[in-house]
Amino acid sequence: MLGLSNPEIMLEGPSYLGSRDLPSPCEQESKWIYNTFHVIKLSRSKRQMEDGEDQMARKVLKPFEGDGNEEKTEDMSLAQINHCHAGDHSELGLLIHQLGRDISISCLLRCSRSDYNAIASLNKGFRSVVRSGELYRLRREMGIVEHWVYFSCILLEWEAFDPIRHRWMHLPRMTSNECFKCSDKESLAVGTELLVFGKEIMSHVIYRYSILTNSWSSGMKMNTPRCLFGSASLGEIAILAGGCDPCGNILSSAELYNSETGKWMTIPSMNKARKMCSGVFMDGKFYVIGGIGVGNSKTLTCGEVYDLKTKTWREIPNMFPARNGGAGATEAPAAAEAPPLVAAVNNELYAADYAQKELRKYDKKKNLWVTLGQLPERAVSMNGWGLAFRACGDRLIVIGGPRALSEGMIELNSWVPNEGPPEWNLLARKPSGSFVYNCAVMGC
Protein backbone atom coordinates (compact mmCIF):
# COMPACT_ATOMS: atom_id res chain seq x y z
CA MET A 1 0.00 0.00 0.00
CA LEU A 2 1.52 3.29 -1.11
CA GLY A 3 0.43 6.73 -0.05
CA LEU A 4 2.18 10.08 -0.34
CA SER A 5 2.48 11.66 3.07
CA ASN A 6 1.82 15.42 2.79
CA PRO A 7 3.43 15.85 -0.64
CA GLU A 8 2.79 19.58 -0.59
CA ILE A 9 5.35 20.08 2.20
CA MET A 10 8.19 18.28 0.44
CA LEU A 11 10.53 21.14 -0.28
CA GLU A 12 13.66 21.42 -2.37
CA GLY A 13 16.17 22.86 0.06
CA PRO A 14 18.89 25.38 -0.75
CA SER A 15 22.55 24.50 -0.61
CA TYR A 16 22.87 24.62 3.18
CA LEU A 17 21.79 22.27 5.92
CA GLY A 18 19.86 24.59 8.22
CA SER A 19 16.08 24.49 7.92
CA ARG A 20 13.66 26.32 10.16
CA ASP A 21 10.42 24.39 10.30
CA LEU A 22 9.94 22.43 13.51
CA PRO A 23 9.55 18.61 13.33
CA SER A 24 6.83 17.19 15.52
CA PRO A 25 9.12 15.30 17.94
CA CYS A 26 10.93 18.52 18.79
CA GLU A 27 8.05 20.96 18.36
CA GLN A 28 7.10 21.26 22.02
CA GLU A 29 10.71 21.60 23.15
CA SER A 30 11.43 24.18 20.48
CA LYS A 31 8.32 26.17 21.41
CA TRP A 32 9.57 26.07 24.99
CA ILE A 33 12.92 27.62 24.19
CA TYR A 34 11.30 30.35 22.11
CA ASN A 35 8.73 31.05 24.82
CA THR A 36 11.60 31.25 27.30
CA PHE A 37 13.08 34.05 25.22
CA HIS A 38 9.66 35.76 25.18
CA VAL A 39 9.39 35.62 28.97
CA ILE A 40 12.85 37.15 29.31
CA LYS A 41 11.80 39.91 26.93
CA LEU A 42 8.80 40.79 29.08
CA SER A 43 10.91 40.85 32.23
CA ARG A 44 13.49 43.24 30.83
CA SER A 45 13.34 46.65 29.24
CA LYS A 46 13.45 46.75 25.46
CA ARG A 47 16.94 47.25 24.05
CA GLN A 48 18.06 48.74 20.81
CA MET A 49 19.09 46.09 18.27
CA GLU A 50 22.54 46.60 16.75
CA ASP A 51 23.53 46.03 13.15
CA GLY A 52 25.56 42.99 12.06
CA GLU A 53 24.99 39.80 14.05
CA ASP A 54 21.78 41.06 15.72
CA GLN A 55 20.17 41.83 12.38
CA MET A 56 21.08 38.36 11.12
CA ALA A 57 19.67 36.79 14.28
CA ARG A 58 16.35 38.58 13.77
CA LYS A 59 16.09 36.99 10.32
CA VAL A 60 17.01 33.41 11.21
CA LEU A 61 15.06 32.97 14.45
CA LYS A 62 11.41 33.91 14.95
CA PRO A 63 9.48 33.09 18.14
CA PHE A 64 6.61 30.60 17.89
CA GLU A 65 3.16 31.65 18.99
CA GLY A 66 -0.12 29.75 19.14
CA ASP A 67 -0.45 26.53 17.16
CA GLY A 68 2.34 27.31 14.73
CA ASN A 69 0.10 28.26 11.81
CA GLU A 70 0.79 31.95 12.23
CA GLU A 71 4.25 33.50 12.36
CA LYS A 72 4.49 36.71 14.38
CA THR A 73 7.61 38.80 14.08
CA GLU A 74 9.11 39.84 17.39
CA ASP A 75 12.09 42.10 17.95
CA MET A 76 13.38 39.66 20.55
CA SER A 77 16.25 37.31 19.67
CA LEU A 78 19.05 35.34 21.23
CA ALA A 79 21.51 37.98 20.15
CA GLN A 80 19.46 40.70 21.88
CA ILE A 81 19.40 38.66 25.07
CA ASN A 82 23.19 38.50 24.92
CA HIS A 83 23.47 42.23 24.09
CA CYS A 84 23.23 43.10 27.77
CA HIS A 85 26.39 41.06 28.34
CA ALA A 86 28.29 42.28 25.30
CA GLY A 87 31.30 43.26 27.36
CA ASP A 88 31.90 39.66 28.46
CA HIS A 89 33.55 37.61 25.70
CA SER A 90 33.48 34.32 27.63
CA GLU A 91 31.46 31.41 26.28
CA LEU A 92 28.98 31.83 29.14
CA GLY A 93 28.49 35.50 28.31
CA LEU A 94 27.82 34.69 24.67
CA LEU A 95 25.04 32.21 25.49
CA ILE A 96 21.75 33.06 27.22
CA HIS A 97 23.09 35.10 30.13
CA GLN A 98 19.87 35.20 32.14
CA LEU A 99 19.54 31.42 32.10
CA GLY A 100 23.17 30.49 32.63
CA ARG A 101 25.21 28.12 30.54
CA ASP A 102 23.77 24.81 31.78
CA ILE A 103 20.14 25.78 31.17
CA SER A 104 21.10 27.40 27.88
CA ILE A 105 22.64 24.11 26.74
CA SER A 106 19.58 22.23 27.97
CA CYS A 107 17.38 24.48 25.82
CA LEU A 108 19.53 23.89 22.76
CA LEU A 109 19.48 20.11 23.25
CA ARG A 110 15.71 20.17 22.83
CA CYS A 111 15.85 22.02 19.52
CA SER A 112 15.85 20.09 16.27
CA ARG A 113 19.27 19.51 14.71
CA SER A 114 17.85 21.30 11.67
CA ASP A 115 17.89 24.52 13.69
CA TYR A 116 21.54 24.32 14.72
CA ASN A 117 22.94 26.07 11.64
CA ALA A 118 20.60 28.99 12.21
CA ILE A 119 21.48 29.09 15.90
CA ALA A 120 25.21 28.94 15.09
CA SER A 121 24.86 32.06 12.94
CA LEU A 122 23.80 34.17 15.94
CA ASN A 123 27.25 34.81 17.41
CA LYS A 124 30.60 33.23 18.24
CA GLY A 125 29.39 31.62 21.45
CA PHE A 126 26.57 29.67 19.83
CA ARG A 127 28.75 28.87 16.83
CA SER A 128 31.42 27.45 19.15
CA VAL A 129 28.92 25.27 21.02
CA VAL A 130 27.38 23.88 17.82
CA ARG A 131 30.64 23.25 16.01
CA SER A 132 32.34 21.66 19.01
CA GLY A 133 30.00 18.68 18.77
CA GLU A 134 29.12 19.02 22.46
CA LEU A 135 25.38 19.26 21.74
CA TYR A 136 25.41 16.00 19.78
CA ARG A 137 27.37 14.19 22.48
CA LEU A 138 24.88 15.29 25.13
CA ARG A 139 21.91 14.45 22.87
CA ARG A 140 23.32 10.94 22.42
CA GLU A 141 23.66 10.52 26.20
CA MET A 142 20.05 11.68 26.65
CA GLY A 143 18.74 9.44 23.89
CA ILE A 144 17.72 12.38 21.66
CA VAL A 145 18.31 11.23 18.08
CA GLU A 146 17.09 12.48 14.71
CA HIS A 147 17.84 10.39 11.63
CA TRP A 148 18.62 11.87 8.22
CA VAL A 149 19.18 9.90 5.03
CA TYR A 150 22.27 10.74 2.96
CA PHE A 151 22.59 9.42 -0.58
CA SER A 152 24.35 10.02 -3.87
CA CYS A 153 22.77 9.61 -7.30
CA ILE A 154 25.36 11.74 -9.11
CA LEU A 155 29.11 11.15 -8.81
CA LEU A 156 30.71 13.44 -6.18
CA GLU A 157 27.32 14.94 -5.24
CA TRP A 158 25.40 14.09 -2.07
CA GLU A 159 21.97 15.01 -0.78
CA ALA A 160 20.35 14.68 2.62
CA PHE A 161 16.69 14.03 3.33
CA ASP A 162 15.00 14.83 6.63
CA PRO A 163 12.10 12.34 6.92
CA ILE A 164 10.48 14.36 9.70
CA ARG A 165 10.27 17.65 7.78
CA HIS A 166 10.19 15.99 4.35
CA ARG A 167 12.98 18.27 3.21
CA TRP A 168 15.82 17.77 0.71
CA MET A 169 19.19 19.39 1.33
CA HIS A 170 22.35 19.56 -0.79
CA LEU A 171 25.79 18.91 0.65
CA PRO A 172 28.82 20.76 -0.71
CA ARG A 173 30.24 19.03 -3.77
CA MET A 174 33.18 16.70 -3.14
CA THR A 175 36.52 17.73 -4.61
CA SER A 176 38.62 14.86 -5.90
CA ASN A 177 40.44 13.55 -8.95
CA GLU A 178 38.92 11.58 -11.83
CA CYS A 179 40.25 8.28 -10.49
CA PHE A 180 38.26 8.62 -7.25
CA LYS A 181 35.23 9.86 -9.16
CA CYS A 182 35.09 6.69 -11.25
CA SER A 183 36.11 4.19 -8.56
CA ASP A 184 33.79 1.92 -6.58
CA LYS A 185 32.80 3.53 -3.31
CA GLU A 186 31.45 2.54 0.07
CA SER A 187 29.80 4.93 2.50
CA LEU A 188 29.16 4.95 6.22
CA ALA A 189 27.62 7.45 8.65
CA VAL A 190 29.03 7.45 12.19
CA GLY A 191 28.54 10.08 14.89
CA THR A 192 28.36 13.43 13.11
CA GLU A 193 30.39 12.26 10.10
CA LEU A 194 29.70 10.80 6.68
CA LEU A 195 32.63 8.72 5.42
CA VAL A 196 33.05 7.90 1.72
CA PHE A 197 35.67 5.29 0.82
CA GLY A 198 37.20 5.06 -2.65
CA LYS A 199 40.44 4.81 -4.57
CA GLU A 200 42.75 7.37 -6.10
CA ILE A 201 45.61 6.69 -8.50
CA MET A 202 48.05 5.13 -6.04
CA SER A 203 46.06 4.34 -2.91
CA HIS A 204 42.73 4.08 -1.17
CA VAL A 205 41.31 7.31 0.21
CA ILE A 206 38.60 8.33 2.68
CA TYR A 207 36.63 11.56 2.35
CA ARG A 208 34.93 12.77 5.50
CA TYR A 209 31.95 15.12 5.61
CA SER A 210 31.24 16.79 8.97
CA ILE A 211 27.82 18.20 9.80
CA LEU A 212 29.57 20.44 12.37
CA THR A 213 31.38 22.43 9.67
CA ASN A 214 29.30 21.46 6.58
CA SER A 215 32.53 20.63 4.73
CA TRP A 216 34.54 17.74 3.27
CA SER A 217 38.09 16.77 4.21
CA SER A 218 40.48 13.93 3.35
CA GLY A 219 43.68 12.44 4.70
CA MET A 220 42.21 9.89 7.13
CA LYS A 221 43.72 6.41 6.81
CA MET A 222 42.73 3.00 8.11
CA ASN A 223 45.31 0.62 9.52
CA THR A 224 44.60 -1.74 6.61
CA PRO A 225 43.24 0.05 3.52
CA ARG A 226 40.35 -1.89 2.01
CA CYS A 227 37.28 -1.80 -0.19
CA LEU A 228 34.17 -3.99 -0.64
CA PHE A 229 33.88 -4.46 3.15
CA GLY A 230 30.92 -4.87 5.48
CA SER A 231 30.27 -2.08 7.97
CA ALA A 232 27.84 -0.57 10.45
CA SER A 233 27.83 2.11 13.12
CA LEU A 234 26.54 2.40 16.66
CA GLY A 235 26.57 5.92 18.04
CA GLU A 236 30.08 7.30 17.74
CA ILE A 237 31.75 4.01 16.77
CA ALA A 238 31.79 1.96 13.56
CA ILE A 239 33.21 -1.42 12.62
CA LEU A 240 34.52 -2.36 9.17
CA ALA A 241 35.23 -6.03 8.43
CA GLY A 242 36.56 -8.02 5.50
CA GLY A 243 36.85 -6.59 2.01
CA CYS A 244 39.85 -6.49 -0.33
CA ASP A 245 43.26 -4.95 0.17
CA PRO A 246 44.96 -2.84 -2.57
CA CYS A 247 46.32 -6.06 -4.16
CA GLY A 248 42.89 -7.69 -4.37
CA ASN A 249 43.43 -10.15 -1.51
CA ILE A 250 40.26 -10.99 0.42
CA LEU A 251 40.58 -9.99 4.08
CA SER A 252 39.39 -11.43 7.38
CA SER A 253 40.71 -8.48 9.41
CA ALA A 254 38.49 -5.84 10.99
CA GLU A 255 38.83 -2.34 12.43
CA LEU A 256 36.90 -0.13 14.82
CA TYR A 257 36.64 3.61 14.19
CA ASN A 258 35.80 6.15 16.90
CA SER A 259 34.47 9.39 15.43
CA GLU A 260 34.98 11.24 18.72
CA THR A 261 38.72 10.63 18.69
CA GLY A 262 39.21 10.13 14.94
CA LYS A 263 41.23 6.98 15.71
CA TRP A 264 41.23 3.55 14.03
CA MET A 265 41.83 0.44 16.13
CA THR A 266 42.49 -3.07 14.81
CA ILE A 267 40.21 -5.67 16.40
CA PRO A 268 40.40 -9.50 16.18
CA SER A 269 39.94 -10.99 12.71
CA MET A 270 36.85 -12.90 11.60
CA ASN A 271 36.87 -16.69 11.28
CA LYS A 272 36.40 -16.45 7.52
CA ALA A 273 37.81 -13.94 5.05
CA ARG A 274 35.08 -12.36 2.90
CA LYS A 275 34.36 -9.46 0.58
CA MET A 276 31.12 -7.86 -0.64
CA CYS A 277 29.49 -8.64 2.70
CA SER A 278 27.10 -6.54 4.78
CA GLY A 279 27.16 -5.48 8.41
CA VAL A 280 24.61 -4.48 11.07
CA PHE A 281 24.56 -3.82 14.80
CA MET A 282 21.99 -5.82 16.71
CA ASP A 283 21.67 -6.32 20.48
CA GLY A 284 24.86 -4.30 20.89
CA LYS A 285 26.85 -6.75 18.75
CA PHE A 286 28.24 -6.44 15.23
CA TYR A 287 27.06 -8.95 12.61
CA VAL A 288 28.66 -9.70 9.23
CA ILE A 289 26.43 -11.43 6.69
CA GLY A 290 27.06 -13.04 3.31
CA GLY A 291 29.87 -12.09 0.99
CA ILE A 292 32.33 -14.02 -1.17
CA GLY A 293 35.13 -16.07 0.38
CA VAL A 294 38.61 -17.11 -0.71
CA GLY A 295 38.68 -19.63 -3.57
CA ASN A 296 34.89 -19.77 -3.78
CA SER A 297 32.85 -17.86 -6.32
CA LYS A 298 29.57 -18.58 -4.54
CA THR A 299 27.99 -16.46 -1.84
CA LEU A 300 28.84 -17.46 1.73
CA THR A 301 25.78 -18.63 3.64
CA CYS A 302 27.34 -18.25 7.09
CA GLY A 303 27.37 -15.10 9.17
CA GLU A 304 29.57 -14.00 12.05
CA VAL A 305 28.92 -11.95 15.17
CA TYR A 306 31.46 -9.89 17.10
CA ASP A 307 30.95 -9.32 20.83
CA LEU A 308 32.43 -5.94 21.80
CA LYS A 309 32.65 -7.00 25.46
CA THR A 310 34.50 -10.27 25.02
CA LYS A 311 36.25 -9.15 21.80
CA THR A 312 35.52 -12.48 20.13
CA TRP A 313 33.86 -13.64 16.88
CA ARG A 314 31.34 -16.47 16.62
CA GLU A 315 30.33 -18.08 13.34
CA ILE A 316 26.61 -18.57 12.62
CA PRO A 317 26.04 -21.33 10.02
CA ASN A 318 23.32 -20.81 7.38
CA MET A 319 22.51 -17.30 8.55
CA PHE A 320 22.31 -15.70 5.12
CA PRO A 321 18.76 -15.66 3.68
CA ALA A 322 17.85 -17.84 0.72
CA ARG A 323 19.62 -16.83 -2.46
CA ASN A 324 18.00 -13.86 -4.22
CA GLY A 325 15.81 -14.99 -7.06
CA GLY A 326 14.21 -17.98 -5.41
CA ALA A 327 13.67 -21.44 -6.85
CA GLY A 328 13.81 -21.70 -10.61
CA ALA A 329 15.21 -18.21 -11.15
CA THR A 330 18.34 -17.60 -13.17
CA GLU A 331 21.05 -16.80 -10.67
CA ALA A 332 23.47 -13.99 -11.37
CA PRO A 333 27.12 -14.71 -10.57
CA ALA A 334 27.85 -13.88 -6.93
CA ALA A 335 30.32 -11.16 -7.95
CA ALA A 336 27.61 -9.49 -10.05
CA GLU A 337 25.17 -9.25 -7.17
CA ALA A 338 25.05 -6.42 -4.68
CA PRO A 339 26.01 -7.23 -1.08
CA PRO A 340 23.08 -8.51 1.03
CA LEU A 341 20.37 -5.88 1.50
CA VAL A 342 19.90 -6.10 5.27
CA ALA A 343 18.94 -3.68 8.06
CA ALA A 344 18.24 -3.92 11.79
CA VAL A 345 15.37 -2.04 13.48
CA ASN A 346 14.79 -2.35 17.22
CA ASN A 347 17.25 -5.26 17.32
CA GLU A 348 15.33 -7.21 14.68
CA LEU A 349 17.01 -8.10 11.39
CA TYR A 350 15.30 -7.64 8.01
CA ALA A 351 16.36 -8.44 4.45
CA ALA A 352 15.16 -7.28 1.05
CA ASP A 353 15.05 -9.86 -1.74
CA TYR A 354 15.43 -7.65 -4.80
CA ALA A 355 14.47 -10.37 -7.32
CA GLN A 356 11.29 -11.56 -5.62
CA LYS A 357 10.62 -8.07 -4.24
CA GLU A 358 10.00 -9.60 -0.84
CA LEU A 359 10.70 -8.39 2.67
CA ARG A 360 11.96 -10.99 5.13
CA LYS A 361 12.58 -11.08 8.86
CA TYR A 362 15.23 -13.11 10.65
CA ASP A 363 14.19 -15.40 13.51
CA LYS A 364 17.22 -15.32 15.82
CA LYS A 365 16.12 -18.31 17.88
CA LYS A 366 15.39 -20.61 14.93
CA ASN A 367 18.07 -19.18 12.62
CA LEU A 368 15.68 -18.88 9.68
CA TRP A 369 14.02 -16.20 7.56
CA VAL A 370 10.28 -15.53 7.39
CA THR A 371 8.68 -13.68 4.47
CA LEU A 372 6.58 -10.74 5.71
CA GLY A 373 5.30 -9.32 2.44
CA GLN A 374 6.30 -7.30 -0.58
CA LEU A 375 8.75 -4.48 -1.13
CA PRO A 376 7.46 -1.23 -2.65
CA GLU A 377 6.19 -1.89 -6.17
CA ARG A 378 8.60 0.50 -7.90
CA ALA A 379 11.72 -0.62 -6.00
CA VAL A 380 13.71 -1.70 -9.06
CA SER A 381 17.40 -2.54 -9.28
CA MET A 382 20.08 -4.28 -11.33
CA ASN A 383 20.95 -7.42 -9.35
CA GLY A 384 20.41 -5.36 -6.19
CA TRP A 385 22.59 -2.45 -7.31
CA GLY A 386 20.89 0.93 -7.29
CA LEU A 387 18.50 -0.01 -4.47
CA ALA A 388 19.10 1.19 -0.90
CA PHE A 389 17.62 -0.70 2.05
CA ARG A 390 18.36 0.91 5.42
CA ALA A 391 17.20 1.28 9.00
CA CYS A 392 16.16 4.84 9.85
CA GLY A 393 15.36 5.02 13.54
CA ASP A 394 12.28 2.87 14.18
CA ARG A 395 11.48 2.43 10.48
CA LEU A 396 12.79 0.63 7.43
CA ILE A 397 13.37 2.69 4.30
CA VAL A 398 13.71 1.63 0.68
CA ILE A 399 15.22 4.10 -1.78
CA GLY A 400 15.07 3.47 -5.50
CA GLY A 401 12.87 3.90 -8.50
CA PRO A 402 12.23 3.08 -12.15
CA ARG A 403 14.74 4.00 -14.88
CA ALA A 404 14.01 4.66 -18.54
CA LEU A 405 16.28 6.25 -21.16
CA SER A 406 18.35 8.16 -18.58
CA GLU A 407 15.19 9.45 -16.98
CA GLY A 408 13.50 8.22 -13.87
CA MET A 409 12.42 8.87 -10.32
CA ILE A 410 13.97 8.32 -6.93
CA GLU A 411 11.36 7.31 -4.36
CA LEU A 412 11.77 7.06 -0.58
CA ASN A 413 9.40 4.56 1.02
CA SER A 414 9.20 3.73 4.71
CA TRP A 415 7.49 1.24 6.98
CA VAL A 416 7.46 1.00 10.77
CA PRO A 417 7.64 -2.73 11.55
CA ASN A 418 4.68 -4.14 13.46
CA GLU A 419 2.80 -7.39 13.71
CA GLY A 420 1.12 -7.05 10.31
CA PRO A 421 2.43 -7.19 6.73
CA PRO A 422 4.41 -4.21 5.43
CA GLU A 423 2.40 -1.20 4.28
CA TRP A 424 4.86 1.17 2.64
CA ASN A 425 4.44 4.91 2.97
CA LEU A 426 5.83 7.05 0.16
CA LEU A 427 7.76 9.80 1.95
CA ALA A 428 9.05 11.66 -1.10
CA ARG A 429 10.02 11.39 -4.74
CA LYS A 430 12.11 13.43 -7.13
CA PRO A 431 13.36 13.14 -10.72
CA SER A 432 16.76 11.52 -11.15
CA GLY A 433 18.73 10.51 -14.19
CA SER A 434 20.60 7.77 -12.32
CA PHE A 435 20.14 5.20 -9.59
CA VAL A 436 21.37 5.33 -6.00
CA TYR A 437 25.16 4.87 -5.91
CA ASN A 438 25.63 5.15 -2.15
CA CYS A 439 23.39 5.63 0.87
CA ALA A 440 23.88 6.04 4.62
CA VAL A 441 21.67 7.03 7.57
CA MET A 442 23.04 9.37 10.23
CA GLY A 443 21.38 9.50 13.63
CA CYS A 444 22.48 12.28 15.99
Image: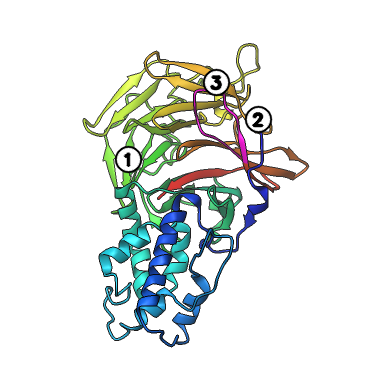
Of labels 1 and 2, earlier in sequence is: 2
Which secondary structure dominates the residues rendered in magenta?
loop
Identify the image quadrant of the N terminus: top right
Real-space CA distance between mark 2 and mark 3, rounded to the nearest whole angstrom: 14 Å
- Disc 1 element: strand
* Amino acid under disc 1: Glu
Q: Which quadrant of the figure has residue 256? A: top left
How packed is label 1: few (under 14 Cα within 10 Å), some, or many (20 or more)? Answer: some
- Disc 3 element: strand
Of labels 2 and 3, earlier in sequence is: 2
Marks 2/3 in contact by CB < 8 Å: the verdict is no
Q: Which residue is mark 3?
A: 372
Residue drawn at point x = 56 percent, y = 23 percent = 421
* Amino acid under disc 3: Leu
Numbered range of the magenta stretch: 413-426
Q: Using the image as rendered, state which of residue 130 and residue 323 is in the foreground.
A: 130
Look at the picture and state if 233 lies above or below 322.
below
Magenta stretch contains residue 234: no
Real-space CA distance between mark 3 and mark 1, rounded to the nearest whole angstrom: 34 Å
Residue 136 locus on image (x, y percent): 35, 55
Q: Which residue is mark 2?
A: 1
Q: Which residue is mark 1?
A: 255
